[in-house]
Image (spheres, rainbow, N blue to C red):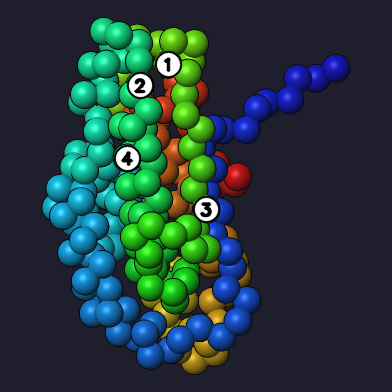
Amino acid sequence: MAETSSPYPVTLSIDFPDRPLDKLTTFFRPFVAIPILIIIGLLAGGTTEVWEGASWSMAYGAGGAVVLPTLLMILFRQKYPRWWFDWNLNLARFGTRVEAYMLLLRDEYPSTDEEQAVHLEIPYPDAEQELHRGMPLVKWLLAVPHYIVLAFLYVAVVVCVIGAWFAILFTGRYPRSLFGFIVGVMRWSLRVAAYAFLLVTDKYPPFALSE
């Protein structure tokens, strides 16, 4: 019997808005989002950028997330403190809600604590059994091929968002094909961030947009 590969331990899904979207807030989205962008910028250490979606995920590694202390704890104690994990997970969820709003995927204003229509799940790792002591030192380097691919993918995302912006203004609807592609790129980016910076898994991220 052929072995089936286990799913990657980072999942993201966003409910497709199968309804007319708000054209007014879509048109003025960069301005309407300013308050929440200030908040996420402060939480992420001021490293988050608006349209370069990959930077949302990478910002957790350089700003608001507990990364270097986690690296040292895994390296010397092979332990991932639960409250550090909870902070990192909730910051990632909040950042993803804001990113989804900026990419026009949803028109509900991002909540600082409620899940809304953006569902990001990362299981708490058993550090002693699942995380190798030395891996956090090299994960950022092993993920370099992903950074390169994601840079090109996010250029495509910008083009798709511009197309979706016009589609929403004229029809009130988000093209489903563009929606699926953008969510897939976000999912890919989050998996790389979870592997290289949040350090929640040693499983190498797949080069895939799918769940």
Q: Quadrant of residue 2?
A: top right
Residue drawn at (21%, 48%) of the image: 44
Q: Does residue 135 lie above or below 175 as drawn?
A: above
Secondary structure of residue under mark 4: helix
User: Which residue is under mark 2?
Assistant: 80
In percent of the image, x 23 and y 16: which residue is there?
72
Q: Earlier in the sequence, mark 2 or mark 3?
A: 2
Decide: marks 2, 1 in contact (CB < 8 A)? yes
Can the viewer see residue 77 in this picture?
yes
Specify which label sits upstream in the sequence, 3 or 1.
Answer: 3
- Amino acid tagged 4: Trp
First reached walking from the N terminus: tag 4 or tag 1:
4
4 or 2: tag closer to the N-terminus: 2
| Residue 84 location (% of width, % of height) | 31, 32
**Quarter of the image containing the N terminus?**
top right
Residues at discs 3 and 4 in contact (Cβ within 8 Å): no
Indicate the amino acid at tag 2. Answer: Tyr
Residue 155 sits in quarter: bottom left
Report the Cα–Cα distance between label 2 and label 1.
Answer: 6 Å
Q: Which residue is mark 1?
A: 127
**Residue 119 vertical placement versus 125 (above, below):** below
In this rendering, the label closer to the viewer, 3 or 4: 4
Q: Residue at x 45, y 38 (%)?
A: 191
- Secondary structure of the residue carrying tag 1 is helix
What's the CA distance linking mark 4 and mark 1? Answer: 17 Å
Percent across and percent down for residue 203 are 49, 23
